[in-house]
Amino acid sequence: MSKGIGGGTTRRQVLTGAAVGAAAVATASLLPADSAQARAGRPGGAQYVTGVDVLPDTSHASKALVNHIRGYFQAKTDKNLDWQTSYFSREQFTYIDAILGWHWYTWQALHDALAGWYPTWPENSKSYPTRILGDTTSAILIFTDTPGMFGPGQVRNFGAVNFNRQGKIERWVDYWDARQFGVTDWQKEQEPPNQWPTNFRETTVGEAASPVMRRVVSRLSEALRTSDIAAAVELFSSDAVYEDVPAHIQITSQASIETYLTKAASLLPYVGAGTGVRHVLGSQAGGGYEWTAANGPIPRGITGIELDPWGKIERFTSVWNGAYADAALLTAFAQQAIEH
């Protein structure tokens, strides 16, 4: 068996062979669900996830979502298979890693993958949210997986998540920057081109985001598609924050954002002809959209959007796979951020 990250088996080998011994792993990894939920599930607890001194920014999420999804990250941290998979719908389910191309289309398939995955994680592994956007209809969950779970460093995920009326997750798609993972390791771990999902199954859940978020995304994506930067910037608040995670760019104020977008429009993967909206998520306060880009080297990504009480964008955060960008392109992003 070939060696992967950290000298162990590759993630793909672990997950595709996970059904072997799944029942034994499940028994060994379980904590009593009632006691685990009692420890971590109380909204007034000092820590959102036990042992993690990071409280997520929940300013653009509903209280119901914040309380509901809390147990998910505790269960994952505890390697509690039954508790974690209780969050997933058994009737309709999709999980896709948009960076590696891995995909599971049934509850049982991901259950068995997780059962084989848990034993490969370091003893003190943690998974915890840093920002939560949306409500119990749909959301973008921004979370960190600690070193050793998915490579030598932290992996910072943006999860596009849809819930059904019972609060079960029907679709989850993760986006992250593979340069944090390591470009060589990403190349080893991603699916071969002929095994990538042919679509990301957004039609299975439909467009359930709030009308406010859908309207903002529609206007923003159209302005960016046509490179109408003035129209795009009109949607931002005066002191908005613009972030491009793989480019390591953060810009504050509507005026500075307009300057940057005008200069960098031809470089940015979510601007210009060929860009489109895959799926919209979230509430009237927070969410965002998954996007596609047909004409450049970066085929897909996700953008988190936080809205102020007047429906203006006060924070825009875009994430895509930086491994698709070479050093020259990443340098060009930074150069365009220099103000004169």
Image (cartoon, grey):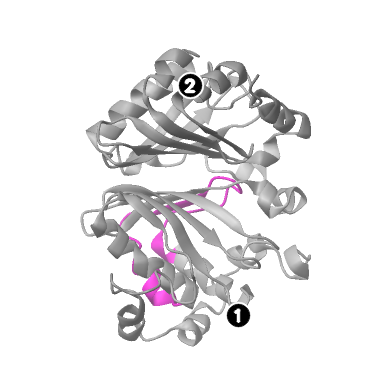
Q: Secondary structure at mark 2?
A: helix
Residues under labels 2 and 1: Cα distance? 47 Å
Indicate the position of residue 226 as horizontal and vertical percent values: 47, 13
Indicate the position of residue 147 as horizontal and vertical percent values: 64, 66
Q: Secondary structure at mark 1?
A: loop
Q: Which residues are magenta?
A: 79-108
Q: Is residue 220 left or right of residue 182?
A: left
Q: Is residue 256 above or below residue 23?
A: above
Q: Is residue 215 above or below residue 123?
A: above
Indicate the position of residue 35 as horizontal and vertical percent values: 33, 86
* Sequence-first tag of 2 and 1: 1
Amino acid bearing label 2:
Ala
Quadrant in the picture for the N terminus: bottom right
Front-lying residue, 217 or 300: 217
Q: Is residue 321 above or below residue 37?
A: above
Amino acid bearing label 1:
Glu
In magenta segment, residue 42: no
In magenta segment, residue 86: yes
What residue is shown with label 2? 255
- Can residue 90 be spotted in the picture? no
Q: Residue at x 30, y 34 (%)?
A: 213
Q: Residue at x 59, y 25 (%)?
A: 268
What residue is shown with label 1? 123
- Can residue 287 be spotted in the picture? yes
Q: Is residue 331 above or below residue 267?
A: below
Q: Quadrant of residue 13?
A: bottom right
Q: Residue at x 40, y 70 (%)?
A: 84
